[in-house]
Amino acid sequence: MVNLDDLKKYCRGKWFSLSDDAEKIYAAIKKRNGCCPCRVNDVMCPCPDHLEELELNRRCKCGLFVANTYDPFPSLLKKFPDLFDIGGYFISCGYDKGWKDIVEEALEKIQKLNKKLDECDIIKIIQIKEKFGGLRIYTNIYNDDAELILKDAERKAKYTCECCGSHNNVTSKGSWIKTYCEKCHQKLQSL
Ligand SMILES: [Zn+2]
């Protein structure tokens, strides 16, 4: 059965952490012999669904995990109010502050591109996230020019520390792959 320390370790270096209620929720997990309190009996904690739930709601269903405080979405929405398919296919924005400029530069280009497009071809952002250490930006429709812009941003992110934005000694590694500079990798190891 997983213990609270294992769960703390599991969160290390990730974009989410144990919530303030973790101890209370862990008591419920213990009572259920290690099973997730909001699932059927034989699903052990951490359950297979928590990542998806965190991406959707910034917390998992039972409230054990919450997304870390850096949330790029409010400022992105302010800067690019028409670029997100809110109420449609929009899912989430989740990445760390080191990639802020790269994402915003790409969105500015998409916004400019949209001005040249017909209403029915307008590109909307549905998700921006970090996956396997890489930046991923997903749109509602495919467009060749947009693809070039987004691929360029994803390429730049490969050489930029997701944590601090540095370009020095940036590598993608770790048990949970992160694209970090050497300093940030070391910080992560020593947590
Ligand atoms: Zn760094």
Image (cartoon, rainbow, N blue to C red):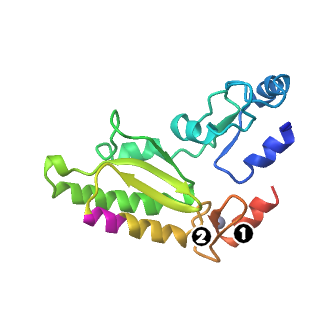
Q: Are marks 2 and 1 in contact (CB under 8 Å)?
A: yes
Task: Locate residue 169, reporting x and y percent.
Answer: 65, 77
Which is more N-terminal, label 1 or label 2?
A: 2
Query: In the figure, 17 relative to 187: above or below?
Result: above
Q: Is residue 109 left or right of residue 4?
A: left
Q: Residue furthest left?
A: 118
Quadrant where the N terminus sits is top right
Q: Is mark 2 within 8 Å of ligand 1?
A: yes
In the rendered structure, which segment of residues is drawn in magenta? 144-149
Q: Which residue is mark 1?
A: 183
Q: CA distance from mark 2 to mark 1?
A: 9 Å
Name the quadrant where ligand 1 sits: bottom right
Say whether residue 50 is magenta.
no
Of the 4 image quadrants, the one containing the C terminus is bottom right
Residue drawn 31% across the image and 47% down it = 83
Residue tagged 2: 166
